[in-house]
Amino acid sequence: MHGIIGFGGYLPYRRLDLSTVADVAGAGGRKGTRSVASFDEDATTMAVEAARVARRRAPDAAIESIWFATVAPPYLDKTNATVLQAALGLPGECGAYDLVGSVRGALGALRAAASQSGPALAVAADLRTGLAGGPDESFFGDGAAALVVGGDTHGDVVAEVGPWISVTGEFVDRWRVPGESRSRVWEERFGEVRYGELGADALERLWKAAGIGPDDVDHLIVTGTHGRACRAVAQRSGVAADRVVDDVAPAVGNTGAAHPILALVDLLERAEAGRTIVLLTLADGAEAVVLRTTGALVRARAAGASVAARVAAGGPVSYGRYLAWRGILPIEPPRRPEPARTSSSAAGRSVPWKFGFEGSRSPDGSMHLPPLPDEGELEPMADARGTVATFTIDRLSYTPSPPMVFAVVDFDGGGRLPVELTDVDADQVAVGDRVEMTFRRLSTADGIHNYFWKARPCRGGDD
Amino acid sequence: MGSHGITDKVAIVGMACTKFGEQWGMGTDDLVLQAAEGAFDSAGVGRADVDAYWLGTAQSGMSGLVLARPLRVKDKPVTRVENFCASGSEALRQAAYAVSSGAYDVAMALGVEKLKDSGFQGANAFPVPSDGTNRTVTAAAMYSMIVPAYAKRYGIEVDQVKQALARIASKNHANGARNPRAQFRKEMSVEQLLAMPRIAGELSVFDCAGVADGAAAAVVVRAEDAHRYTEHPLYVKALSFIVGDGSGVSDPDYDYTTFPEVVLSAQEAYRQAGITDPRAQLAMAEVHDCFTPTELVLMEDLGFSERGSAWKEELAGTFELDGELPVNPDGGLKSFGHPVGASGLRMMFEAWLQMRGEAPEDRRISTYGKRNLALTHNLGGYPGEMVSFVSILGTEGPTAGG
């Protein structure tokens, strides 16, 4: 049996109250919220967080390849998936590939992962922004999702992956020239009609290939780049309305390339065993796949934070700060020297620490962060939790979002690290707070992103 | 094996110190020249009489050329040393050892820093190429962690600690106001200080050392030669330097209420100088008050106060000019300013003035004429990863036959 053996989603902590948009932008916004990646997050860091959850649910899978899809790659020319390989502590033999630039690429990532003989990681992440006051800003969100695909020998299959139908359609409905900060869209009816045809065609082929009909479907997920088309295709699919899965999170927004997988992960975190799922994605064509859940599902999802828990755990960010974080509103930087660029060669020597957050365990049992150069065994500490021993608020240090909150963290099982806190409000930190580690982008200089770890409060939903 | 010190083998016979502060009209060369020439004059020597130079600077230049070029020294060894904020003390230490070894007859130690050309407020370390995982937090923030830690360890309120810190700043400002070389010459009341906005933890800008340009220099010779240069030399009784291994920042047992490197360097200096009761034996101390909580902790680490009682002694005025043991009578880093590489020698310059009766009446230490030993303490780094220097200087030379 071959199928999904691990699954995980990630949503950034911050939520923008969209009712505050119009006061600033003059128009736009809506009731409700969207998810907002922190100033120190990008598609790669969010992908790492989602993949960490997926791997915790498939702990025995020795992943042989990573397929990373995003419309918002932190790097071009340089592969982004290699950052995932390093941050997840995967060995050098693990292949790592980007599928960059379109929502459809996420389905390509999943299809590629599902085609491998060995365990493979499909992960998609996106920052979806758009111009101030526009519909993309209000209906999109930031997030990531990951699936580990493999066979029985790699882990417990929680959902078999059945027939896969791919229908490709070349037409211009949503597009962006590289380097531009926003996408453009054609008038809505054209896309609705084209996607209507493509979606119906894909489902028709899927019923034949799988030998099932709409009545056999327990859960139908329809996502894509054209919200109205998705709703219309679902309505005309023949699947009963109460079996059409509601959008993963109205409080989050459409997370672009991440969204199809995020919706599936969210469903897997709620669905029962023995259920038939159809995932239909409308993006420059239609991709349709059948999945069938197994009895291993319930046990697997006990580990790690669920998408629903992440949705529930959000905290507010003001519209002004959101605009500043995305670079839409240029704000005065701190009057301090900007960070120097990271040395590529020094970073290259430091991969287990800088990306993998591995400390060294000395023979006397003590844990050293960073690892000692000449003693002890490397030990992954990314999943260790800690307690704030003391902390301070630094209003002088360079940070894109002052003030910096800095804490001395004592880890369960030993080890101490003075480290920056993130996803916190400075006035809500206290000695004794429980924290967990999260992979972040500290700064960017000369186009080199400085990735490392920060600590964040443990919030509801994590085990 | 052992650390033996060079008690009474070397003496300081001339010192000088520039005005510290925003020296927009002076570069590193000008500061070096002014301090060196002042020290030559003070010792009654010319450039040709100095056999070797040690230059302490953290980041105002590299190599001995920083001194040799402006002084036009063509034929002498000049060694640039760097040890964080203790670079000036390190220069003196190396010069003293060189003279005591017999390698040279006359040596100069000079510390200089030109901080105000960076274009940024505050002091900023020169970035060494790295993997990007270093702490990015400021020194102020690191030292601010002492405040809640001290309150917690001794069961007092943070506000009580803050009162003591304001007293420290107020004391140092009062002393600096009486010092024409000091960067800040304005007295500050405890109330004014407590009302300042916070920049790091509980600290305000007025809890931090002044960012300054400046230079200071000393001429050292063998003790037996000292009286050829001055009637009132200052004898080196002890020099100690301890560099920790930096493990404090990652040690879960470290609690941010003490600096172990300082404790060790003080013990070593007291051993060399034969001091058993520093509070009673020292006439004065110049200590590294880079931030007010640093001075608070130093009072305990240097053995001036019992553990947990320095905050009360600060409030009682123990370390004020007229107190039992005057600390930072020149205003300290807080008010005199902190041109990194110069500060260690600036501290010794104050001992030079005070112990030889040259400090002006209005900031003369209460102990003048009653005790003959002064301490300077100079540190660099952060709580948990620190270098610490202690010197003991005295007006009494080697006893006959000693």
Image: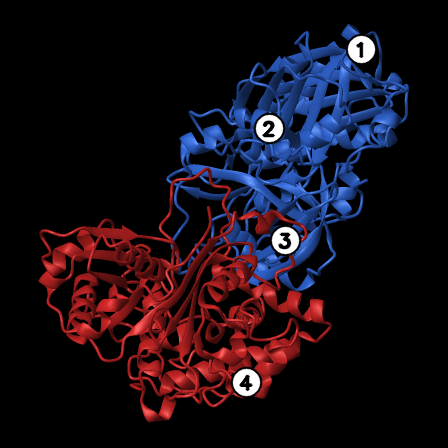
Between marks 1 and 2 in the image, the one whose residue lies nearer the viewer: 1
Residue B113 as seen in the image, left or right of residue A25: left
Query: Within 10 angstroms of label 4, few (less than 14), some, or many (20 or more) residues?
Result: some
Which residue is labeled 4 in the image? B318
Do the dots labelled 3 and 4 sit on one chain?
no
Please tell me whether mark 1 sits on a helix, a strand or a loop. loop
Which residue type does callout 2 highlight? Gly
Residue A333 versus residue B34 in the image, above or below = above
Mark 3–mark 4 CB contact (< 8 Å): no
Query: Within 10 angstroms of label 2, few (less than 14), some, or many (20 or more) residues?
Result: many
Find the distance from the CA under tag 1 to the CA under tag 2: 41 Å
Which residue is labeled 3 in the image? A408
Which residue is labeled 2 in the image? A191
Q: Residue at x 33, y 79 (%)?
A: B182
Q: Is residue A268 visible to the viewer in this orientation of the structure? A: yes
Which residue is labeled 1 in the image? A152
Which residue type does callout 4 highlight? Thr
Find the distance from the CA under tag 1 to the CA under tag 4: 76 Å
Find the distance from the CA under tag 3 to the CA under tag 2: 53 Å
Subunit bearing disc 4? B
Query: Within 10 angstroms of label 1, few (less than 14), some, or many (20 or more) residues?
Result: few
Q: Residue furthest front?
A: B401
* Chain colored blue: A
Q: Residue at x 57, y 69 (%)?
A: B297
Please tell me whether mark 4 sits on a helix, a strand or a loop. loop
